[in-house]
Image (tube, grey):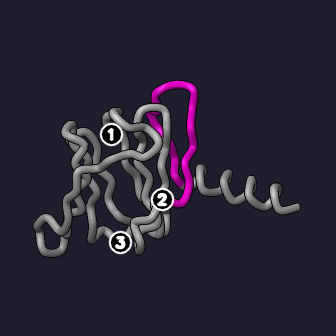
Amino acid sequence: MIALSCHPTGKLLLSIGADNTLKVWNLVKGRLAYATCFKSKTSPGNTLNLVSWSGDGAYYAIAVGQTVEIYDTDSAAEVYVIKGATKVSCFDLSQVITIIISSLIKQRS
């Protein structure tokens, strides 16, 4: 296991492994709820290195190589990708979402 992130409700846990498996754990029932071999569309071939929930649990993000990919929790659809110059070693998803929203508002003005 490479990284863990607990949902704000405390009922779910995301984990990622060296084999690029993304798992959702149901902490109430104490068992695995879902698992998938994660395939990044923007960074194929890179290993997952971080995972995090947003403060409200509406989104989760996965750092893959030089990118942070943000997904909608309900649909599991990718909603935003941030590409950096070097491998992502940490991020604060609440800050990332604030920056994205500010950027989108400026683009529409």
- Image height check: is 91 above or below 27? above
Looking at the rendered structure, the secondary structure element under dot 2 is: strand
Q: In the image, is 39 to the left or to the right of 74?
A: left
- As for residue 92 lying within the magenta part, the answer is yes
The residue located at (46%, 37%) in the rendering is 90
Q: In the image, is 71 to the left or to the right of 23?
A: right
Residue at mark 2: 78
Q: Quadrant of the C terminus?
A: bottom right
Residue at mark 3: 9
Q: Place residue 94 in its image quadrant.
A: bottom right
Q: Position of residue 104 (x, y in %)?
A: 74, 58
Pointer 3 local density, CA inside 10 Å: few below 14, some 14–19, many at least 20: few
Looking at the rendered structure, the secondary structure element under dot 1 is: strand
Nearest to viewer (mark 2 / mark 1):
2
* Contact check, label 2 and label 1, Cβ < 8 Å: no
- Image height check: is 87 above or below 2? above
Looking at the rendered structure, the kind of residue marked 1 is Leu
Residue at mark 1: 48
Nearest to viewer (mark 1 / mark 3):
1
Looking at the rendered structure, the secondary structure element under dot 3 is: loop
Looking at the rendered structure, the kind of residue marked 2 is Glu
